[in-house]
Image: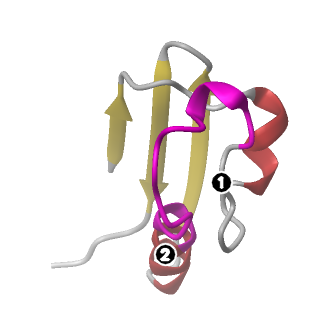
Amino acid sequence: MTVTDTGLGIPDKDLPSRFKLLGKTSSNHNRNKTGTGLGLTICKKLCEKLGGKISLKSKEGVGTKVTCEFLCFY
């Protein structure tokens, strides 16, 4: 499952902290945006509970792509 946006993107220096609890972007361009910093932490925990893995790619000024890979049995 992949979710892509065309928002502000995440600076490279902030990528490692995005999956940590309350891991928010520190750059000034994002200072007026609000958020709890919980979204990716929750996604990571859910993906891991499903036995999967999550990855994040982002380019500042372009957007972000979050991918969660897991096996789905039906």
Left or right: where does residue 56 sit relative to residue 14? left
Q: Which image quarter holds the C terminus?
A: bottom left
Mark 1 or mark 2, which is nearer to you?
Answer: 1
Mark 2 neighbour class, 10 Å CA radius: few under 14, some 14 to 19, many 20 or more = some
- Which of 14 and 48 lies nearest the eye of the viewer? 14
Q: Earlier in the sequence, mark 1 or mark 2?
A: 1
Q: Residue furthest bottom?
A: 49
Where residue 60 appears, as percent x and y from the top left, is 62, 18
Q: Amino acid at mark 1?
A: Lys
Left or right placement of residue 19 versus residue 66 in this view: right
Residue shown at the point (54%, 27%) measured from the top left: 9
Disc 2 residue type (three-letter): Ile
Residue 53 picture location, percent across and down: 57, 63
Instruction: Label 2: state its secondary structure.
Output: helix
Which segment did they paint magenta?
26-41
Mark 2 — residue? 42
Give the residue at x 69% y 29%.
28
Tell me if residue 10 is in the magenta stretch.
Answer: no
Please determine whether, in this image, residue 1 is positioned above or below residue 22.
above
For the residue labelled by badge 1, is the local secondary structure a helix, a strand or a loop? Answer: loop
Q: Residue 13 appears at what percent x and percent y?
A: 84, 34
- Residue at coordinates 59% horizontally, 42% vertically from top-left? 56
**Residue at the far top in the pictured view:** 61
For marks 1 and 2, give the CA distance: 14 Å
- Queried whether the magenta region covers residue 33, the answer comes back as yes
In the displayed structure, would residue 54 be above or below residue 4? below
Q: Which residue is mark 1?
A: 24
Query: Main SS of the magenta segment?
Result: loop
